[in-house]
Image (tube, rainbow, N blue to C red):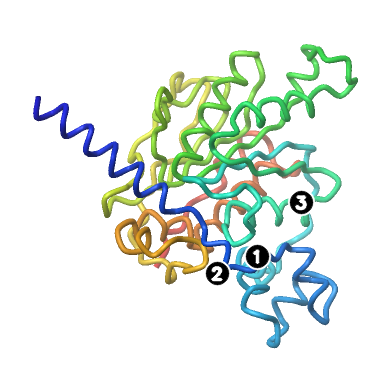
């Protein structure tokens, strides 16, 4: 009986904590990558990053692109691909202050003709599935051929409940015989009737980032349903303190009681490394095996 009440109490705490991660719209100015460029003196994300007079809202909307611009990334040729992201809690899919959304914006900006990158709320799994199937249906006849399925290059990532939904989407695609290049889980919290611990065999590569502090913390271990078909790059525990939590993203009660779970989402250094991994997966200059094996996680300090 005590175990039953303990599980109920844990569920209540989880629901309360994730509910209060809804963004305070009144406190944040929604500025997209394009809008930030237009509102500044420059004409690109790099210009905004270098503009000292840029507003705090503009800089907040470009945390990840600015970090990647400073890396002086080489130009690479990539395969055509679909990248789907899922935000956690009750975050809006188009909230540009969240790094999941910024990652998709970065990919669209870096690979405008090769990559379709789109973000969904974690309760929009059916919408995401329909969109992927629509994008794969290149001849528009409503039926995916074996060739259309085999040529699919799909990457899925997410934070919290969004990470659980990422694995679920991969599993749903697998049920239809569609391969997935990569899944990325960031402090994954299992949703009801989902399994975020076992990566389905249609996924070629998977990686898991988590932290172990606070009331809410992510799954520490993921495993492959079929190790012969899926490579787990690692289960990486993030121990370093990230940057100060962005007050625009989260309500005060979430910042007070759910700090570590939000810090891992708010750390642009981690998402920069995720972007680097996605760059490697998309690159046509490396073989399918080399793209993943050549990537190594650099511990954050």
* Residue 97 position in % (x across, y down): 59, 62
Q: Residue at x 47, y 55 (%)?
A: 265
Mark 3 or mark 2, which has the lower sequence index?
2
Q: Residue furthest bottom?
A: 53
Please state which of residues 290 and 175 is positioned toward the viewer in this rendering.
Answer: 175
Residue at mark 3 to residue at mark 2: CA–CA distance: 27 Å
Residue identifier under label 1:
68
Badge 3 density bin: few <14, some 14–19, many ≥20, Cα 10 Å: some
Q: Could you say which quadrant of the image residue 238 lies in?
A: bottom left
Badge 2 density bin: few <14, some 14–19, many ≥20, Cα 10 Å: few
Q: Is residue 42 left or right of residue 100?
A: right
Residue at mark 1 to residue at mark 3: CA–CA distance: 14 Å
Q: Residue at x 44, y 20 (%)?
A: 225
* Residue 107 position in % (x across, y down): 72, 52
The numbered mark at residue 27 is 2
Quadrant housing the C terminus? bottom left
Mark 1 or mark 3, which has the lower sequence index?
1
Q: Nearer the viewer, mark 3 or mark 2?
A: 2
The numbered mark at residue 108 is 3
Q: Secondary structure at mark 2?
A: helix
């Amino acid at each position: 009986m005590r175990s039953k009440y303990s599980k109920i109490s844990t569920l209540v705490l989880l629901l309360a904590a994730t509910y209060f991660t809804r963004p305070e719209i009144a406190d944040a100015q929604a500025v997209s990558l394009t809008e930030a460029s237009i509102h500044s003196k420059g004409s690109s994300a790099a210009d905004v990053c270098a503009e000292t007079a840029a507003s705090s809202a503009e800089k907040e909307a470009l945390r990840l692109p600015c970090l990647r611009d400073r890396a002086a990334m080489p130009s690479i040729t990539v395969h055509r691909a679909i990248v789907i992201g899922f935000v956690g809690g009750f975050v809006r899919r188009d909230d540009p202050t969240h790094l999941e959304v910024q990652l998709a914006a970065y990919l669209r900006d870096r690979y405008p003709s090769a990559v379709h990158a789109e973000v969904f709320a974690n309760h929009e799994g059916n919408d995401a599935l329909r969109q992927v199937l629509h994008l794969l249906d290149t001849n528009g006849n409503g039926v995916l051929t074996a060739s259309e399925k085999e040529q699919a290059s799909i990457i899925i990532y997410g934070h919290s409940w969004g990470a659980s939904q990422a694995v679920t989407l991969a599993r749903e695609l697998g049920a239809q015989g569609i391969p997935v290049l990569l899944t990325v889980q960031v402090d994954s919290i299992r949703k009801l009737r989902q399994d975020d611990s076992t990566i389905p065999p249609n996924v070629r590569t998977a990686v898991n980032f988590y932290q172990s502090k606070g009331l809410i913390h992510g799954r520490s271990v993921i495993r492959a349903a079929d190790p012969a078909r899926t490579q787990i790059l690692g289960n990486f525990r993030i121990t370093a303190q990230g940057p100060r939590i962005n007050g625009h993203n989260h309500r005060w009660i979430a910042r007070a009681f759910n700090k570590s779970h939000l810090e891992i989402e708010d750390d642009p250094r981690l998402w920069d490394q995720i972007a680097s991994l996605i760059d490697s997966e998309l690159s046509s200059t490396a073989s399918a095996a080399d793209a993943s094996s050549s990537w190594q996680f650099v511990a954050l300090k």
